[in-house]
Image (cartoon, rainbow, N blue to C red):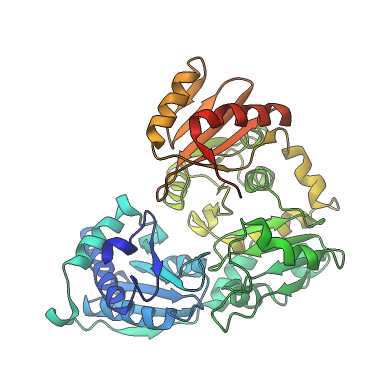
Amino acid sequence: MLSKVFKAYDVRALYPKPLNEALAWQIGYGTAQLLLQEGAAAGFIDPMSRSICVGRDMRKSSPSLSAQLKQGMRDAGASVIDLGLVDTPMVYFAINHLGCAGGVQVTASHNPAQYNGFKISRREARPVGQATGLGEIQRLASLVEATRITPQGGGEEARDLWSDYRAHLLSFLDPALIAGTRVLRIAIDASNGMAGTMIPRVFEGVKGLVIEKLYFDNSSGEFVHEPNPLVESNLRDLQALMATGKFDAGFCFDGDADRCIVLDERGAPIGCDLLLGWLTQDALLKAPGKAVVYDLRSSRSVVELIREHGGVPIESRVGHVFMKAKLAEARGVIGGELSGHFYFADMWNTDSAARTLAAVVSALATTKQPLSALIKPCVRYAQSGEINFENEDKLGALAALKAAYPKAKTHELDGLSIDAGSWWGNIRLSNTEPLLRLNLEARDQKTVDATVAELSQYLGHRVAH
């Protein structure tokens, strides 16, 4: 059953089959073994080096899964610090704030309510993916059974870190917002997820933020709409709210509040690559000459904007494991993906939707221009958006496409990136489905449309949205 719940970047599956409390115990035991072994090998001997932070989201299955996960950790000899109901970035904060060996958030992120899972991090909130520890946790978990081990008796304590977390995040807000000399009205859709807990605990009481709330109640563990802000239909209620009055911006969060989509004052969603390009200006003013890490599917304008503002553009594969590693390696200041994950050096290179909100409203506070006007200079090319194609021979299709354009510049960091001069783009392989994902760009929409039609003969059957 373990093989059915371990994915490329985390543990995630339907509850209670295949993911259940028995597997949660095994995974907790395996996670503790890995993190404690790493700490010992690195020479850490302080008490916190044997402590693991555990948080959970509001799903109905989260309390029981969390309880067994923690028990497995304690039986392996780890001490557990229970953070309670928190957003995923709070776990990253706690690991660093307390100096823990690592941490786990019990969540299935943007998946429907019947799913659950575990996001696992090591010391300094460094990511654990399939090739960087998750596979080893699976192996360790598969070797242990609760009835056949001698519990090591690790302890457990509850910690409330909300005041420390709030202080950390509010330190990034523009002083005019704190003082209330600049007031912004924003609309927030918490998607019945953990933003419904985090936003009031962190941002309520800030004089310069007037917040209109939508779907903040997360007590039922159910969702009014799917907690995935990338799906346009999930933004409709937020857009309807914004249409009722004058707003400076809107924010729609996913289930565990590690990512969000930002809407301009008209309720139009902003592409995350374009938002990164805009945020780069403010980030590089505060950290001149630093690197900015961008998702390789991003608009070419992002690279141009990074360079124009004196930064160093660093391309990354898609996925939080790769983005975090690149940002740390390059000692960059900020990074972003098309999925709504934004990464910050001052958040230990992790993704944080709360930090994204702070960055957006702080940049808005310094100008009287509307957000749409501020984003407009970042829109320099026509984009296809992500288009999926069904194809059972994904590698064969990419080889055929590469052969069809022998004069084009190509590289294969993640799928196939291709620059034919008049158009450029990336085709990635789905990890879990027979799908190819195309993102294409050109100087005008006519070229985009014609090229998408041309490439379809190589990529397969186009999947309707």
Q: Can residue 449 be seen in this view?
A: yes
Task: Write the residue at 60% across / 71% down.
Answer: 195
- 37 and 237: which one is in front? 237
Task: Write the residue at 25% across / 81% down.
Answer: 154
When the figure is inspected, residue 37 is found, relative to residue 311, above or below; the finding is: below
Residue 387's quadrant in the figure? top right
- 120 and 279: which one is in front? 120
- 110 and 57: which one is in front? 110
Q: Position of residue 448 (x, y in %)?
A: 66, 30
Q: Where is residue 389 in the image (x, y as percent from the top left)?
A: 51, 41
Q: Can residue 118 be seen in this view?
A: no
When the figure is inspected, residue 371 is found, relative to residue 292, above or below; the finding is: below
Q: Where is residue 390 in the image (x, y as percent from the top left)?
A: 48, 42
When the figure is inspected, residue 444 is found, relative to residue 216, above or below; the finding is: above
- 374 and 13: which one is in front? 13
In which quadrant will I find the N terminus? Answer: bottom left
Residue 124's quadrant in the figure? bottom left
Q: Position of residue 284 (x, y in %)?
A: 63, 43
Task: Write the residue at 70% across / 76% down.
Answer: 204
* Number of numbered markers: 0
Residue 3's quadrant in the figure? bottom left
Q: In this view, does 392 lie to the left or right of 162?
A: left
Q: In this view, does 322 lie to the left or right of 207?
A: left
Q: In this view, does 349 lie to the left or right of 76?
A: right
